[in-house]
Image (spheres, grey):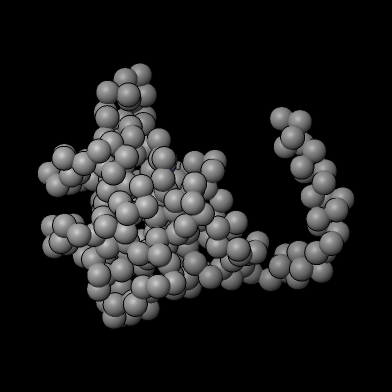
Amino acid sequence: MEKIVAGVQHFRTVEFNKHRTFYEQMASRQQNPIALFITCSDSRVMPHLITQTDPGDLFQIRNAGNIVPPYSAAGGGEGATIEYSLEVLGIKHIIVCGHSQCGAIKAILDGGNLEGLPAAKSWFSHAEATKRIVKQKYSDLSPDEMAIAATEENVLVQLNHLSTHPCVAARLSAGLVQTYGWYYDIGRGRVLEYDQSQMKFVDLGTSVRAASPMPIRSSERDAGFLLTAKEEL
Ligand SMILES: [Zn+2]
């Protein structure tokens, strides 16, 4: 804990004072974030760092496996946070970001590791579709390739869950909100984004966004979507 406490002291005495006006102005008005950023609890994933954004820019939901329970099952904080971000904060962009070397994805693929973890087992049932898609389509891949495929498919599964929330569905149909599927490669510092026109994840910034913000269901995608990630292995 010493590192964390020292960090708090450094923030208060050095960093805060450097940007005191910024923080005071931010505190004096309602937050106005650019996007809702849904990602994994993994300590190596730092949304503000990889997007180079400031305090106030990202409204966040974090949990094991960047999971979005479907509306019918969303009794926890996720549904409420999504609703608040759209209805109250007026957010127009929602990012679901998975990442490389994700322990949650490994656990989802290998349910045997969840013995003695009943809460995690129940939580990962929201990624059952991910598990089945991987089994159906990627059983011939190496473990590393399969982990990438599972992480990418899980992002799309969770984007589909997101669209079952009425506040999201209504805005998607009216073109008032856009959703994005990301894959963050920790060891390479790369962010890939799902490109609907190419039906695969591509380096963020190089994709041409499709008109519709809705993700394509996995069954409609071709087998080539993994090429970008696989080439980097
Ligand atoms: Zn993770």
**What is the total number of numbered labels drawn onto the structure image?**
0
Position of residue 15 measured from the top left corner of the image (x, y, whole percent): 81, 55
Q: Residue at x 32, y 24 (%)?
A: 113
Task: Please determine whether, in this image, residue 16 is positioned above or below residue 7.
Answer: below
Indicate the quadrant of ligand 1 in the picture: top left
Task: Please determine whether, in this image, residue 199 is positioned above or below residue 152.
Answer: below
Q: Residue at x 44, y 72 (%)?
A: 205
Residue 81, by quadrant, is bottom left
From the viewer's perspective, tell me whether residue 139 is left or right of residue 198.
left
From the viewer's perspective, tell me whether residue 131 is left or right of residue 213.
left
Q: Nearer the viewer, residue 119 or 80?
A: 119
Position of residue 124 measured from the top left corner of the image (x, y, whole percent): 31, 37
| Residue furthest out toward the top | 116
From the viewer's perspective, tell me whether residue 23 is left or right of residue 97.
right
Q: Nearer the viewer, residue 169 or 125?
A: 125
Q: Nearer the viewer, residue 191 or 214?
A: 191
Position of residue 89 measured from the top left corner of the image (x, y, whole percent): 51, 69
Q: Residue at x 21, y 41 (%)?
A: 141
